[in-house]
Image (cartoon, rainbow, N blue to C red):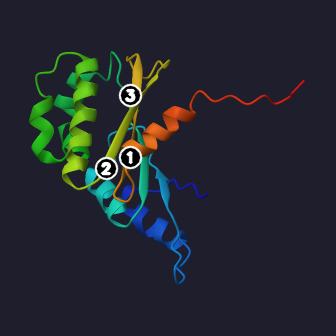
């Protein structure tokens, strides 16, 4: 496992330099957790990573509260939204009045864009208790060109309730 805290424009080269070379019949599997805690990570970079055969997990966590609300992102951070979603989707967020609707639409547009680019995707929602986000839940997305994201999500959900007894009597 490697953890990188690098700028987006350095991430492809950084990850490539850490991947062991392939051997006949064997290729390194790469699983990337992209956790920018912002909307500064371009959808094009995610597409490039997936094109290299990487599987990606991305929590959609970014400050969304009374001060940094949907109007802040649509009005003051339009270029960041365009980079995150792709320029053609920015207008679809305009006019949304609530953070909840903004967040849901943003995640839905992101997933749709990656589906159009040929990635399989699965989304899951999780309870949230944070002062940074004024939402009751946040979403995590799994994106891959190699695997059925829905199948992986189904397997995870089945095993979610398994419990093992650590100290049998």
Q: Residues within 10 Å of mark 1 (few under 14, many from 20)?
A: many
Instruction: Pick whichever of labels 3 and 2 is earlier in the sequence.
Output: 3
Q: Residue at x 33, y 45 (%)?
A: 121
Whole-percent x and y of residue 50? 35, 59
CA separation in Å, label 3 and label 2: 27 Å
Task: Determine the image quadrant of residue 76.
Answer: top left
Quadrant in which the C terminus appears: top right
Task: Determine the image quadrant of residue 101.
Answer: top left
Q: Could you tell whether 111 is left or right of 25 in the image? A: left
Q: Residue at x 86, y 27 (%)?
A: 168
Q: Decide: is 48 above or below 68.
A: below
Q: Secondary structure at mark 2?
A: strand
Please report contact status of discs 2 and 1: CB closer than 8 Å, yes or no.
yes
Instruction: Pick whichever of labels 2 and 1 is earlier in the sequence.
Output: 2
Instruction: Pick whichever of labels 1 and 3 is earlier in the sequence.
Output: 3
Q: Residue at x 43, y 69 (%)?
A: 13
Residue that mark 3 sits on: 63
Q: Residues within 10 Å of mark 3 (few under 14, many from 20)?
A: some
The tag on residue 120 is 2
Q: Could you tell whether 168 is left or right of 63 in the image? A: right
Q: Nearer the viewer, mark 3 or mark 2?
A: 2
CA separation in Å, label 1 and label 3: 27 Å
**Nearer to us in this view, 33 or 125:** 125
Whole-percent x and y of residue 59? 42, 37
Whole-percent x and y of residue 96? 15, 21
Residue that mark 1 sits on: 149
Q: Secondary structure at mark 3?
A: loop
Q: Residue at x 63, y 30 (%)?
A: 162
């Amino acid at each position: 496992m490697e953890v990188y805290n690098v700028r987006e424009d350095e991430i492809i080269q950084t990850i490539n330099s850490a991947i062991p070379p392939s051997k006949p019949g064997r290729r390194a599997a790469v699983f990337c957790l992209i956790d920018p805690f912002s909307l500064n990570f371009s959808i094009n970079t995610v597409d490039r990573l997936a094109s290299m055969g990487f599987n990606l997990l991305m929590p959609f966590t970014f400050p969304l509260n009374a001060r940094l609300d949907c109007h802040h992102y649509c009005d003051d951070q339009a270029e960041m939204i365009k980079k995150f979603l792709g320029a053609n989707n920015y207008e679809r967020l305009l006019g949304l009045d609530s953070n909840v609707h903004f967040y849901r639409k943003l995640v839905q547009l992101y997933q749709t864009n990656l589906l159009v680019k040929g990635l399989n995707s699965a989304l899951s929602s999780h309870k949230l208790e944070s002062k940074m986000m004024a939402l009751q839940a946040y979403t995590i997305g799994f994106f891959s060109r190699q695997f059925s994201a829905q199948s992986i999500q189904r397997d995870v959900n089945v095993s979610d309730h398994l419990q093992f007894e650590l100290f049998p009597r």
